[in-house]
Image (cartoon, rainbow, N blue to C red):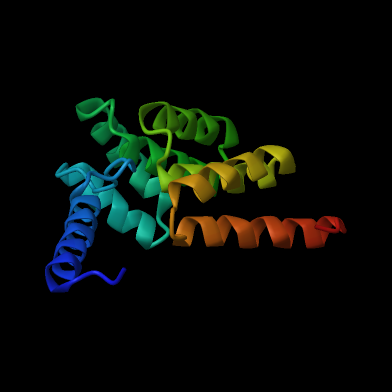
Amino acid sequence: MKPTGLGVIASTMAACLFCVTAAAAPSSDPPQSAPANPDYTEAAALIEAEKFAEALPLLKKAESAEPDNADVHNYLGYAHRKLKNYDAALKHYKIALRLAPRHRGANEYLGELYLVLGDLAKAEERLAVLDKACLFGCEEYTELKDAIAAYKARMGKDK
């Protein structure tokens, strides 16, 4: 039986209501916005300019002000990794992920650190987390996937 005019309208309205409700539902991803901390803001600009050593003191001040901020720990890990302070980088990435397990930046960067340390399996674990965290794909997933592929090519691994 074909729906009548009212049936079609009711079905369409129900479908639209579902779409609006789904779109308005809060995301399960943690917010990844920069804190309003001026030290963090200045450090982020220094990191963008690849001045990692100069960014560290500001990030440490930001960490003192906001010890439970995953973004601060992510950038601390990033700056330390770029300076080849791998133990410190690992520590801060792990703190960031304890605070926000689906933090896309920390998952990507930790995966990249694992590649530097030669631990492909752990890098692939981070990629799997990003695959779940990035429902429709994201830059962090793509970049780690590409880094893993390049690592495998360098190491002569198939897959």
In the image, 71 versus 141, the foreground residue is: 141
Q: Judge left or right: residue 157 versus residue 61.
A: right
Give coordinates of residue 122: x percent, y percent: 66, 37
- Residue 103 horizontal/vertical position (percent): 40, 42
In this rendering, the answer to whether 53 lies above or below 50 is above
Above or below 94: residue 31: below
Locate residue 68: give its quadrant.
Answer: top left
Name the residue rendered at 24%, 69% in the picture.
3
In terms of depth relative to the viewer, which is nearer, 145 or 15? 15
* Left or right placement of residue 78 versus residue 125 in this view: left
Q: Residue furthest front?
A: 1
Q: Which image quadrant is residue 156 in?
A: bottom right
Which residue lies at the image location 36% right of the left edge and 48% below the top edge? 54
Can you give x and y, in whole percent of width and height, for residue 65 in the image? 20, 28
Whether residue 119 is visible, yes or no, is no
- The N terminus appears in which quarter of the rendering? bottom left
The quadrant the C terminus occupies is: bottom right
Give the residue at x 67% y 46%.
116
Displayed quadrant of residue 146: bottom right
Q: Residue 28, relative to residue 48: is it above or below?
A: above
- The residue located at (14%, 44%) in the rendering is 36
> Looking at this view, is 155 or 138 the one in front?
138
